[in-house]
Amino acid sequence: MHAVTPDMLPAVRPQPAVPLTPATPWQAVVAAYLDAACDSRNTRRAYARHLRDAFTALAVATVDALTGADLAAYRARVTASDLSPASQGQALAALRSFLSWAGTLGAHRLSTEVVRKALRTPKAAVLRPYRTLGEADLRLLLDAASTSRDRAIVAVFLGAGLRASEVVGLDCSDLHDDADGGLVLHIRQAKGRKDRHVPVQPEVRRALLDYLAATGRRLGDLGPLFRAYDRASGKRDRKRLTTRALGYLVARLAARTGLTAKALSPHSLRHTYALRALRAGANVIAVQKLLGHASVRTTQRYLDHLELGELRAAVPPLPLA
């Protein structure tokens, strides 16, 4: 039986020590909300910033001091700001979510209907140009990965569509052979604290097994799948690769292949995976499940980018030499 170490236990967030009331300062309510209601580190960081900005603008001492008119005025301020439509939507969503939680726990007396109407998300069609790789560039990036580890990492990004945090979170024990002999990646506690299983093609399985063999390991072993090889790794207790290191790796491979003009990132490879799956005929629901999207609407944004290719094909080429 293996010993249980602290990093193997689920994180336990502190709960408010005292009940929240209409007299509780907004700073204390926000701190309690971030600890109790925001499981994702990235969400917690973004919402903390938006809520701090909101209460600085609203200039109240308690959440209960807010009125519907205050919220409507704040919404007008956000929608008139220089923030992108996506950032405006996130700022309003953060305050909406916070007020819903805080009202349930007794920190204010605003009705749900007032909060919903005063902070409604502005309607905007936001089409973000995804940075992706074509088939030729994809091969170049794979060829540029000179070690078994780097090749396995690129193969997992392009062949499984994982987020960077999910790649570094993989353990050897998260790789399983299914009944058909194919490899399945078990993604534990991903975004939204949801588990999922992602099947991969034989070439991705080979890349992963080659890396394990090169490091003297096999499926089912304990410990992180992707190890850090930097000079400081020997001084750390944990040998797991970091998301920052993944970003450096992708940038380094892009520079090695002359793809720096695309400003590639680990998420670019995830976008590439999604678009390749849709172009190969996968339905949107299947791609949603593979990517771990909470809403199919997020996955459907990729369809807009497929349509761009069709529009380009409708325009005849210029007679340039």
Image (cartoon, rainbow, N blue to C red):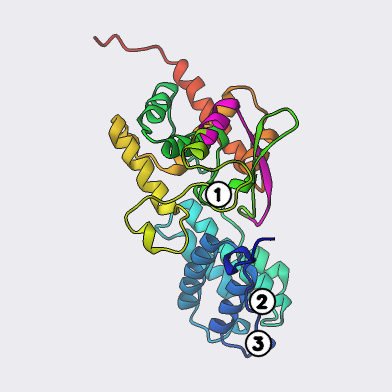
Quarter of the view holding residue 284: top right
Q: Look at the numbered disc 2 and give the secondary structure of its residue.
A: helix
Q: Residue at x 55, y 38 (%)?
A: 161
**Residue wearing tag 1:** 166
Rendered position, 274 above or below 162:
above
Identify which amino acid the numbered label 2 is placed on.
Answer: Ala
**Residue wearing tag 2:** 102
**Residue wearing tag 3:** 17
Residue 98 relative to residue 321: left or right: right
Residue 61 relative to residue 288: left or right: left
Q: Look at the numbered disc 3 and give the secondary structure of its residue.
A: loop
Q: Residue at x 65, y 87 (%)?
A: 17
Q: Residue at x 51, y 20 (%)?
A: 310
The span shown in magenta is 192-209
CB within 8 Å, label 1 to label 3: no
Q: Please check the rendered image and state whether residue 194 is part of the magenta-colored stretch, yes or no.
A: yes
Mark in front: 1 vs 2: 1
Rendered position, 233 above or below 308:
below
Which class describes the residues within 10 Å of circle 2: few (<14), some (14-19), or many (20+)?
A: many
Identify which amino acid the numbered label 1 is placed on.
Answer: Glu
Point out residue 207 in the picture as x, y percentages from the top left corner: 51, 32
